[in-house]
Image (cartoon, rainbow, N blue to C red):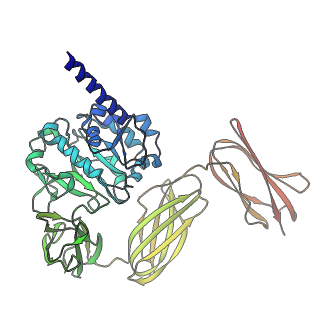
């Protein structure tokens, strides 16, 4: 009996310690891991939570409502976030909270990321627990200053009935611009069962093909599309839907992907992207560095694993700086994917994937970046060209409801092979959602369009405001701007110097947003005038008067 009470006391003590872990508030992000409760099984006793605790981290488990209430700054305070495995829940309601505010938390993720389509809970004694523990060890791994927020995301069974490629929107913000994550499920009969590890990676240390194989339908989703430039394929299923060729020649479909702020292997390959005319020369450079020291005299193999000119491109030995380079060409158009491999410290290691585009004729203008930023009512479009041929310039066009309007023009650099940066600010844009594009125009009148990939949202202002009219002094027309953070009854009136009303510009209800009003004083004489904004919105009111000068 005494032994039983002793055991109970020990269990209570362990439970108390675990409760301390789960209730811990986020301190610095070198100590706390955030878990969305709906995505795990058994709360603090889940495989994911226990793996974090075993690694010395505190755990905070939150409800959907608590998750939704967090800001981007809140998410950035954690060492990592976890969207785990709720023991095979079909349908993605468990990740709804994360999906609904993915644009809030995903920008905070700049550390190591692991994404897997497996269901480790059903097979936690068949390698599943080891897979979770080792991937979390990678996600939580040290980095200089311990300032990065990582992520572990398990898709569990969310998309298992999906028989056609389906976008995983919860992952969309974790991809590079223009990239997408799409998965295909097991579809009841098409279970992924023959597994192969394709990359040397800290998340897989000690695991083998046999460890992760024979899970039958517990490998639920595999990737038909992914951000191949930023994510490395770690594990493939060899038996179904071949869409990926590994550096060792095996083929299959990926179901475990990873990226990180540190180089995944001891090999870094560059450049990440490049475009050349077929038949011209392109140089690839691999850098081998192990624990801060260059790997010298090692043979590196460069292989095209997708696109035109497949197979081994060439081999080269590293120099005293650990660098090996080859120059090659391809005579077929298309997008080529290339990796470098070498044996380092007795392990066959694989580099990141780079992308090479071979074209038939040079483009008049080639862009490497096209982005936007919003500040109040001002939308700034930035873009960078790699090369320009016969480029007269760019028209900047804005669209709302499908109708395009030219809002500006920037002169081009004519002919250049150096990178050029451009910027244009579209000022005083009304609240709403817009699309932007560039119309690149040649000197001979030919043109092509470059579309901004994201929609631009000019939101409602934070405060009521009335701005100084412009121009001022004016003759006879001027513009008056004001801002409404809420809907309300708006009155905008002009008075002369004696206080007599001379014009009523607005006297009606207006929705929240930014407004510009034209005032024409053609019938008035020169002098000082005043304009007054009076707004009533619920229990709030706003009144402001400014002076303007009419000079004829």
Residue 21 in picture, x, y percent from top left: 35, 36
- The residue shown at (59%, 55%) is 430
Instruction: Name the residue furthest front.
Output: 2
The N terminus, quarter of image: top left
Residue 51 drawn above or below residue 401: above
- The residue shown at (9%, 58%) is 250
| Pick the front one: 490 or 12 | 12
Tally of marks: 0
| Pick the front one: 180 or 284 | 284
291 to the left or right of 550: left
- Tell me if I can see residue 443 in this picture: no
| Pick the front one: 134 or 88 | 134
538 to the left or right of 24: right
333 to the left or right of 60: left
Instruction: Name the residue furthest bottom.
Output: 415
413 to the left or right of 351: right
Rendered image quadrant of residue 56: top left
Rendered image quadrant of residue 365: bottom left
Residue 254 in picture, x, y percent from top left: 19, 52
The C terminus, quarter of image: bottom right
Residue 499 in picture, x, y percent from top left: 89, 52
């Amino acid at each position: 009996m005494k032994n039983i009470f002793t055991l109970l006391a020990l269990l209570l003590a362990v439970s108390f310690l675990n409760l301390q872990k789960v209730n811990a508030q986020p301190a610095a992000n070198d100590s706390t891991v955030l878990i969305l409760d709906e995505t795990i099984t058994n709360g603090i006793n889940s495989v994911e939570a226990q793996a974090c605790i075993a690694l010395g981290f505190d755990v905070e488990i939150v409800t959907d409502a608590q998750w939704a209430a967090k800001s981007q700054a809140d998410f950035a305070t954690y060492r990592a976030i976890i969207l785990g495995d709720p023991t095979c829940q079909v349908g993605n309601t468990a990740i709804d909270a994360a999906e609904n505010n993915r644009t809030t938390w995903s920008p905070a993720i700049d550390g190591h990321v692991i994404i897997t389509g497996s269901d480790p809970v059903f097979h936690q004694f068949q390698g599943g627990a080891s897979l979770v523990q080792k991937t979390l060890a990678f996600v939580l791994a040290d980095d200089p200053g311990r300032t990065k927020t990582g992520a572990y995301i398990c898709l569990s069974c969310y998309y298992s009935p999906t028989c056609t490629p389906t976008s995983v929107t919860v992952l969309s913000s974790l991809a590079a611009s223009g990239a997408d994550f799409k998965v295909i499920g097991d579809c009841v009969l098409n279970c992924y069962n023959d597994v192969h590890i394709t990359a040397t990676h800290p998340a897989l240390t000690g695991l083998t093909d046999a460890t992760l194989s024979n899970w039958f339908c517990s490998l639920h989703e595999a990737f038909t599309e992914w951000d191949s430039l930023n994510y490395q394929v770690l594990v493939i299923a060899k038996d179904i839907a071949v869409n990926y060729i590994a550096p060792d020649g095996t083929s299959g479909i990926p179901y475990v992907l990873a990226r990180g702020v540190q180089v995944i292997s001891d090999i870094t390959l560059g450049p990440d992207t490049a475009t050349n005319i077929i038949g011209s020369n392109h140089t690839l450079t691999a850098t081998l560095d192990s624990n801060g020291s260059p790997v010298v005299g090692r043979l590196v193999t460069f292989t095209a694993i997708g696109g035109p000119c497949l197979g081994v491109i060439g081999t080269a030995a590293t120099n005293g700086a650990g660098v090996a380079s080859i120059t090659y060409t391809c005579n077929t158009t298309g997008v080529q994917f290339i990796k470098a491999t070498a044996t380092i410290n007795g392990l066959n290691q694989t580099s990141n994937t780079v992308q090479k585009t071979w074209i038939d004729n040079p483009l008049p203008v080639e862009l490497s970046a096209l982005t936007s930023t919003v500040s109040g009512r001002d939308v700034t479009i930035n873009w960078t060209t790699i090369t320009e041929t016969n480029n007269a310039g760019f028209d900047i066009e804005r669209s709302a409801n499908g109708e395009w309007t030219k809002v500006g023009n920037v002169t081009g650099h004519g002919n250049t092979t150096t990178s050029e940066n451009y910027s244009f600010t579209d000022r005083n844009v009304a609240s709403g959602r817009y699309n932007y594009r560039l119309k690149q125009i040649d000197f001979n009148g030919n043109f092509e369009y470059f579309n901004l990939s994201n929609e631009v949202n000019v939101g409602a202002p934070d405060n009521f405001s009335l701005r100084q009219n412009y121009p001022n002094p004016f003759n006879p027309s001027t513009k008056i701007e004001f801002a409404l953070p809420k809907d309300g009854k708006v009155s905008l009136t002009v008075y002369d110097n004696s206080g007599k009303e001379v014009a009523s510009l607005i006297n009606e209800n207006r929705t929240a947003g930014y407004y510009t009003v034209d005032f024409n004083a053609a019938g008035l004489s020169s002098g000082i005038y005043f304009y007054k904004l009076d707004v009533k919105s619920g229990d709030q009111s706003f009144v402001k008067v400014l002076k303007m000068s009419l000079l004829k």
